[in-house]
Amino acid sequence: MRTPFSRSLPALLLALMLPALARAELAFIANPENRLHGLDLETIARVYRGEIRHLPNGAKITPVDQPRGSPLRKHFYEKVLGMSEKELSRYWAKYKFTGKRKPPMVLSSDAEVKRWVANHPDAIGYISGESLDDSVELLQIIP
Amino acid sequence: MIRHPRTPARALLLGGLLLAGSATTAQAFEGITMSGYLTVKATYGANDDTSGNQADYGRGYATDSVNFNTYESRVGMQFDASLTEHIDTTLILLATGGNDNFNIGVEWAYVDYNFDDRNRLRIGRYKGPFYMISEYQEVGYAYPWVTAPLEVYSTNPIRSVNGLAYVFQTTTASGMDFLLEIYGGNGSNESVVQPNVADYFNNDSNPNNNIPKGTIVEFDTKNMIGFNTTFGTEAVKFRVGYMSTKVDAPAFGMNNVSGSFGGLGLIVDLDRFLGYVEVIDRDTDDSAQMQSAFPDQRAGYATLGYRFGDYLPYLTVAKLDRGKTDSAMALRQTSLTLGLRYEIADGAALKFEATRARPEENGGAKYGLFDAPLQGETGTIVAASFDLIF
């Protein structure tokens, strides 16, 4: 059940963060219906490593990714997973083709990530701070 | 004659792209993801046997002409689709080189039912986790070597399992992984007759026994049951596995003979330092017939590597030896391999390696992995590969 307060809270937070966002490189986003406020970076890292597909509360969570080689992707993996893109490729080479873990689905741009997240209640993704709007909910800013 | 797998690769890519409806890497088509791998490998080994003829290595792996078109060159395309929250499907097309043809087929296809993030039931045709890297042996980019050490990886010709697997998999928040896979099923496979076995029958008094070298024997595995477990972190991971199966090989008049494959392994992958260690034990039926056609073997290797930026030089020592039953047909050899892996770009690697193999005596002859006893004490094999994932 969503209260008027919970609906306005993200907007309020967004307004408060706007000065920061101008400088922010990366905004972590979720579907507004997916109440993931406070999702920590360690959990996000585990989701992006394919270790978990559900949160402890049982909610399904499906990550989407930016294209290989994009500056945002490099920034995200270095900052949150501590991995270079080459390390990431070696990691997925071992897990993806054995079906032991599933890599995030790759979309081609901020606009596509935003559209996907806005249309899929279980989705999370990341975009540049400048692309943020109210179709998605901001979870974290990664400087 | 040098052959590149370019045309089949392109045809396969095109087919894959039509299926996925998308033109770039690992793209999403409303829930279907496509990814793949490619290996183009060249091998060379000019070594004289005792009569001065060329001795090939690894049952066709390396000969005295630069060989691009062995089964070692391949393209794989994987399609994944989630049907429901619990059901994932995977289809892998594989094209491999070999003789004059590229063989393309649906190599693996399976359905996973995910009870939750930890428990999964797999049904279908999948790559068996027989040895440490068996499940991704086709994905050259996933490991340091041009070729996984043949002393170990040539001892098991079984590729796939048609059946069921139960997989329990968990990672703690602190990064400790635990995986247990229990699997069973059957399969159809092929294996090249051991050169020393072919020579043995060709030299005996019964001409009806003659088997040309390089003969491929088809065999069926049934009542296969095994487990594979890994534990540790991404930096240090241990592996223990065991599989036993019954085998029918009508060409050899074998019916319901037993075989098992056990192994221990360790992968250390730190920032700069890389280490692989694995030992395996192949234990087949004690009958004289089985011990002469597919004898017991033990094998192992250790690889040490160090990353200098995009360069990874590595060294592998390996040994293949008699197993539990002391068969005169068991192959014995030691080898030393020096290699270099270079990361060309994200997802692409170029690798070179040179192997000095020293066959050791068994049953009165030194075959090792060569197809005839060598003139000298050692033979040299060089190989290079281009490995890509996309």
Image (cartoon, rainbow, N blue to C red):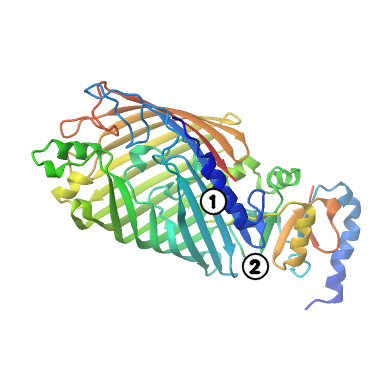
Q: Secondary structure at mark 1?
A: strand
User: Which label belongs to residue A60?
Assistant: 2
Q: Residue furthest bottom?
A: A1
Side of B249 where A36 appears, left or right: right
- The correct choice, above or below, for A4 with respect to B288 in the image is below
Nearer-the-camera pick, B117 or B161: B161
User: Of residues A20 and B71, which is closer to you in this image?
Assistant: B71
Residue B234's spot in the image, x, y percent?
Answer: 53, 47
Report in which chain the residue with disc 1 lies. B
Q: Distance from label 2 to label 1 (Cα)?
A: 28 Å
Residue B329's spot in the image, x, y percent?
19, 39
> Does residue A103 show up?
no
Task: Please state the chain letter of the residue tagged with numbered disc 2 in the rendered image.
Answer: A
Q: Nearer the viewer, mark 2 or mark 1?
A: 1
Within-10-Å neighbours for mark 1: few <14, some 14–19, many 20+: many
Q: Which residue is mark 1?
A: B77
Q: Amino acid at mark 1?
A: Met
Judge whether B281 appears above or below B149 on screen: below
- Residue beneath the point at 23% across and 51% down: B284
Residue B207 spot, x, y in % from top left: 12, 41
Identify the residue at horizontal 54%, vertical 49% (top origin): B12
Report the amino acid beneath label 2: Lys
